[in-house]
Amino acid sequence: MSRRWVAVLDSAAAFLVAATAGWALTAPVAEQIGIAGTDSELRLLMTSRPLAAAIGVVLAVAVAGALARWDSRAAAHLVAGSGLAVLGLVALVNTQAHQLEWLIALSYLAGIGAGLALGGAAACAADRYAAVALAAGAFAVFLLADLVANPIPTTETSDYQGWTAYSLPTTEGTMVTDPPWWLLLPALGCCVAGAVLARGSATAPAGSSRRPLYAVAIVVVTGLVSNAVLGGHRGDWSVAAPALALLVVAIVIAAFLLDGRDGVFLLTATAVLAAAAPVIVAVGGEWTGIAILLALLVAGAAVGSRWANPTLGLMLLAVDAAAGLAGLNDAWAIEGIRYLALAPIAGYALASAVPRRAVSVPVGLSVLFIPSALTIAGQGTGTWLRDQMSLFDQLPRGLASPTPPDPFALSLAMTLVILACVEAAHRLRQRDQST
């Protein structure tokens, strides 16, 4: 096979593996399933999901760094495939596991599998296009996983009715939705084909620094701590504003631990998350709407690959977040435009800022999968009992999400976060040029 088609295969593998691993890290809860247990048991179960995601992203950075030093494309594909195999095993066992201890163990096993897969895929992203595909796949699942796993019902009767967090499962299924087989199997096939067809070593700079590990540790620890602190104070800006500010400072410090472009990618991913936070509408569960969003994302990433401008990407994200300050009468129309615009703008911004080193890709993507103050500051309180069953809260998105108590304040706060990322990225590039 020609080098060109091998590069296409690497890009396809990066996109599919990132989407599959990102699904496992996001771990959407199956809304139609209940499970019996005490408050402490359910809290332990729901808390295991974000902790497993934290383990996964740290493992991804460690694996990507080790494989980059090993400098073997075939080995990287095999490691990514082994992580997907673990996720497949978890999916098979998960359909039969209803005891809390098994579900908790499977959550952590899924986090480990996702970390292996994402780290291997990052090490395979030896050129710019593969790195862009990796970032686009991760953001696609961040934006769409919950919509695909739990379509918003369009009829009066649905499986969402008639269960509580203390009821036994009434239909066949699992507590947490695993990556679908139509996503997992093609990703695994691409990894196997990539390992067979791989020739030579990776071309991405390897690097032996431990700074990416320090950076992702800062992001994970401060993110989880800030999220836990805000669990009962989502709409209280006297608590949320300082927590949000400290988190942004920590992320900036983590970005400055990396090389210039690598740190800009982390700041861009943070800005993408900030732009997504105020959005309170979604396309619903129709495949047409999901396909449109995915097409817009891919189009934005393609433009960013060809005409990269990280500063422009960050400023477009700031405009999207600031649109919530307009305060027009037809607020839902504005929200719909912001939601549709988020996909191509985020795709462009992430593609424009892909890092030099493979190991820095999962560092930047970690902010998308770790609950933090960015995900809940200023948000409304959920109506599901499961929202109170964890030390950490996820980002409420979609039509079923509660409206923020003060949408104007939330949009303002997230706009300021993005502008802080713009300034930090500017100073980071200046430092990079001076050295």
Image (cartoon, grey):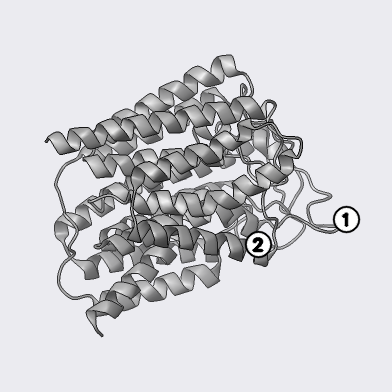
Q: Residue furthest top?
A: 238
Q: Residue furthest left?
A: 435
Q: Secondary structure at mark 2?
A: helix
| Residue at the spot of label 1 | 156
Q: In this rendering, would 151 be left or right of 79?
A: right
Q: Position of residue 301 (x, y in %)?
A: 42, 58
Q: State the quadrant of the N terminus.
A: bottom left
Crowding at mark 1 (Cα within 10 Å: few <14, some 14-19, many 20+): few
The answer for how far apart the CA atoms under marks 2 and 1 are is 21 Å
Query: What amino acid is labelled 2 in the image?
Result: Gly
Q: In this rendering, would 4 be left or right of 282?
A: left
Compared with residue 73, is residue 155 higher up or lower down, i.e. above or below?
above
Question: Which residue is rendered at x = 62% and y = 35% of the image?
Answer: 324
Q: Nearer the viewer, residue 86 or 340?
A: 340
Query: In this rendering, which labeled residue sits more in front, label 2 or label 1?
Result: 2
Q: Position of residue 47 (x, y in %)?
A: 54, 38
Q: Nearer the viewer, residue 72 or 286?
A: 286
Q: In this rendering, would 265 be left or right of 289?
A: left
Q: Which mark is residue 289?
A: 2
Residue 24 visible? The answer is no
Numbered circles on residues, count: 2
Query: What amino acid is labelled 1 in the image?
Result: Glu
Q: Position of residue 140 (x, y in %)?
A: 50, 56
Q: Which mark is residue 85?
A: none
Q: State the quadrant of the C terminus.
A: top left
Q: Secondary structure at mark 1?
A: loop
Question: Which residue is rendered at x = 29% and y = 39% of the image?
Answer: 263
Quarter of the rendering containing residue 178:
bottom right
Looking at marks 2 and 1 on the same chain, the residue that comes earlier in the sequence is marked by: 1
Q: Position of residue 380 (x, y in %)?
A: 68, 31
Question: Which residue is rendered at x = 27% and y = 63% of the image?
Answer: 124
